[in-house]
Amino acid sequence: MSETHLSTRHLLGIKYINEADIQLIFQTADEFKDVINRPIKKVPSLRDVTIANLFFENSTRTKISFELAEKRLSADVVNFSASSSSVKKGETLLDTVNNVLSMKVDIIVIRHPTPGTPIYLSRRVEANIINAGDGTHEHPTQALLDAYSIRNKYTDVAGKKVVIVGDIKHSRVALSNIFCLQKLGAKVKVCGPPTLIPKHIESLGVGVEYDIDKALAWCDVANVLRIQLERQDVKYIPSLREYALFYGINRERLSKLDKEITIMHPGPINRGIELNSDVADSEHSIILQQVENGVAIRMAVLYLLAGRR
Amino acid sequence: MSKGRIILNERQFALTLQRICEQLIERYGSFEDTCIVGIQDRGAIFSDRMVTLLKERGIDAFDYGKLDISFHRDDYRKRDRPIAPSQTEIDFIIEEKHVLLVDDVLYTGRSVHAAMSALQQFGRPARIDLLSLVDRRFNRHFPIRADFIGLTADAIDEAYVKVEWSHIDGKDQIKLFSKKESS
């Protein structure tokens, strides 16, 4: 029996944790993956811990995944969504959160459309903060579960070639993935239409490829992102049809490769646009494993953060 | 720094394990419908040794597994840091079976309490017995007692009892330290 801990008391982004933290989360998630595959999927670790899920932006799978992770750890959970709250009545973020905290909440899981919101909160409130996505900035638990899924498929992330395809400019998943994969020693490229690739992204140490076929030929794993129409204030691509034609991944594209690659997607998939059903539902895809791993990873993060006095 | 006092030497240690082994055979016979579960990490080292001894005597009808209790402990959030979990290796159901729970030192009883809670994930056992190599009988926090005991050690609360194993620590022996930091 040995003790362990993360280097931080919040999970604000992958940028703010180190490789040892990531490995510790993975090792802990291994044990939780074992737990959630048992007939009784619940452990009592967090039975005196109260967690508030504050979702100021729509979410289906992340919210469900966090809630399931919290309940399987026996925590008490309160849910809050901006659409049905006093935010509509003009309450500020800090007021909302302080009101929630005065109900003795220990951990806050927050999703917010403004980048940096979790960092702002972590400096002003006592609770542990977990970032569940802040605008176009970071989505650390998604990156952790993506890297964890790669590790489980290939035993190690180091040395693997990963291409992130699609709307890199508006994607917090892309940024968190880049940080996480690089910290674990993977090689990362991004691929997409020039309008959706941020300027100076090379300064993060990633390669840029505009030709999807070349990118697929290079990689071991392709993490395909959703085209986020809701974040695009101006037209970045002429049409979805044209995007699907030039960047959509289908069986025909994969059959041209002389090797098998793994396809990932953080969901929700726009079938027929970035990913065709014949790929999404094929044996190359580990999309559903990603969802299962998401619960184990979130249990690990909650366990490790809540365990610090 | 104190080196610790040996309270069970190598020769006595071997005799004790043999004695426990005979007691188990006396109690469980052929070990049908019985499973042995070691508590990770140090309890599982002890259960590994006992299983080897039983197999040397031709007994292998039992199921054998290792149980991690990290997620069931009641001192989570009472410590400065969480406990690193180990692997649970139980690929059988304990429903209606006799379970022999194995730990190295029985002290406050909290680990055993956590282990009994963790075991419920694998079914409802007919009965749980406890084997502990060392019993610190005056330090209990819960009404828990061992059914099989290697050595009874009477020590004050601050003292620390460590079971050492030849393949890990160099020698099979049990030591008593005056304070935990000195281990």
Image (cartoon, grey):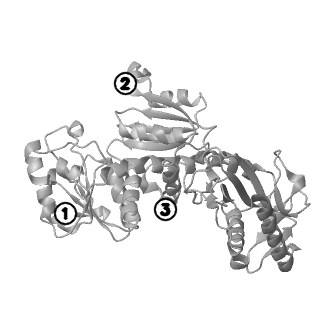
User: Which residue is pictured at 18% across the width and 47% down the height?
Assistant: A277
Snapshot quadrant of residue A178: bottom left
Q: Position of residue A304 (x, y in %)?
A: 56, 51
* Viewer-proximal residue among A82 and B48: B48
Q: Which residue is mark 2?
A: A83
The first of marks 3 and 1 along the sequence is 3
Determine which of the numbered discs, if any, sits on residue A216 in the image.
1
Disc 1 residue type (three-letter): Leu
Q: Chain of mark 2?
A: A
Gap between marks 3 and 2 measured at Cα: 37 Å
Question: Could you classify mark 1 by the number of other residues whose Cα lies within 10 Å: few (under 14), some (14-19), or many (20 or more)?
Answer: many
Query: For this rendering, which residue is in front, A128 or B180?
Result: B180
Horizontal arrangement in the rendering, residue A74 relative to residue B77 (left or right): left
| Residue picked out by circle 3 | A23
Does the residue at mark 3 contact the one at mark 2 (Cβ under 8 Å)?
A: no
- What kind of residue is marked 2? Ser
Task: Report the residue at 40% width, 67% height from top.
Answer: A155
What is the spatial separation of the Cα atoms under label 3 and label 1, in whole angstroms?
Answer: 27 Å
Amino acid type, label 3: Gln
Q: What kind of element bears circle 3? A: helix
Residue nearest the viewer, comparing B157 with A7: B157
In the displayed structure, B99 sits above or below A84; it is: below
Helix or strand or loop: what does disc 1 sit on?
A: helix
Going by the picture, which residue comes out furthest to the top? A89
**Which circle, 3 or 2, is nearer the viewer?**
3
